[in-house]
Amino acid sequence: MMNKSVLAIAWLGFAIGGSTLWAQDAQRNRQGDQEWRLAVMTYTFNRFTLFEAIDKSKQAEAKYVETYSWQKISPAHGETKFEPTLAEDVRKQVKQKLADAGVKLVGYYFHELKDEAAARPVFAFCKDMGIEYIVSEPDPKNLPMLDKLAQEYKVKVAIHNHAKDPKRPEYTYWNPDEVMKALEGCSNWIGCCADNGHWARSGLDGVEAIRKYRGRLVSMHLKDVNKIGPDAHDVPYGTGVVPMKDLLAAVQKMGFAGVFSIEYEHNMENNQADVAQCVEYFNKVKADLGVK
């Protein structure tokens, strides 16, 4: 039997080696160097092309965007979508569009990363485009393979949650406990993209749920909604039932430094003013909390 000193050393080794992200969180809190970046998930503007969505995001004073794979590039590009098969010359045009707008592309939603042959081109595309993380809903059995690719390409994977669906009992990512269970054994290159709007639609307490992602939060689809329940729809930050200040305070205490994305899925033909209101509200709360 090990003596108490040996046990203490073993425990310390586990705490340092096995809880790296928790330690980083605590360090950021002590130093006060958390940085929150606010992006627009371009699905917000899914009635428009990617180039138009970049312009609309800039008009809302967002400096970052998260994109998705089936959005068309621009009217001039016809049916061409922002997919991993995108030709090199079009990739350069997208990069130039972002540079001209002063907007940085940080995330990319690709719904399901399947086998390695299908997933590898997605990672390669993201690396080429300077994308930091892929938001996806992969089968848990594929996480070891994705962990390997994430480390190889230095592109993180963030598991996204949609709402609980009684017609799909096999879908468990709506439950943060199930997401964290799936991540057991994964490196820090795989984590979570928390969608608190879908938590509200699932009847979950967003503040309680987000705390479960401590050490695994890569990004967040930040939402306010008009009510709790499956029929809830998005509203400008601070005008709905989400305790937004409490939610962001909880994220701050976690030491999170990363990206929050506005994914506004309501009034989608004319939601520019709503998005701008979300940007203004977020920046005010961030300043009140003393976050960069």
Image (cartoon, helix red, strand yellow):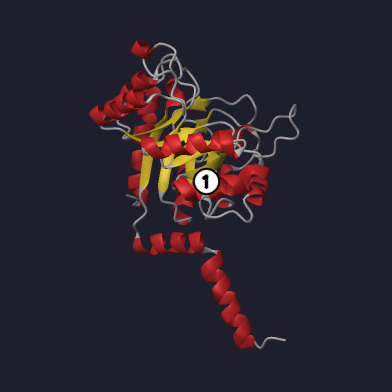
Within 10 Å of the Cα at label 1, are there few (<14), some (14-19), or many (20+) other Cα atoms? many
- The residue lying toward the viewer, choosing from 109 and 121, is 121
Report the residue at 48% width, 26% height from top.
Answer: 69
x%, y% of residue 214?
54, 54
Q: Is residue 166 left or right of residue 58?
A: right
- The residue lying toward the viewer, choosing from 240 and 251, is 251
Dot 1 lies on which element? helix
Report the residue at 41% width, 64% height from top.
Answer: 27
Report the residue at 52% width, 38% height from top.
Answer: 120
- The residue lying toward the viewer, choosing from 231 and 104, is 104
Report the residue at 36% width, 39% height from top.
Answer: 130
Which quadrant of the figure has residue 72?
Answer: top left
Q: Is residue 76 left or right of residue 26?
A: left
Residue lying furthest left? 100
Residue lying furthest front? 117
x%, y% of residue 203?
66, 36
Q: Is residue 234 visible?
A: yes
| Number of callouts | 1
Relative height, residue 26 to residue 266 (above, below): below
Q: Is residue 233 left or right of residue 7?
A: left
x%, y% of residue 94?
33, 26
Which quadrant of the figure has residue 131?
Answer: top left
Relative height, residue 102 to residue 153 (above, below): above
Q: Which residue is mark 1?
A: 149
Q: Check the picture and name the quadrant holding the N terminus.
A: bottom right
Q: Is residue 136 visible?
A: no
Relative height, residue 207 to residue 199 (above, below): below
Q: Is residue 290 left or right of residue 124?
A: left
x%, y% of residue 230?
65, 27
- The residue lying toward the viewer, choosing from 240 and 269, is 269
Type of amino acid at the residue the image marks with label 1: Leu
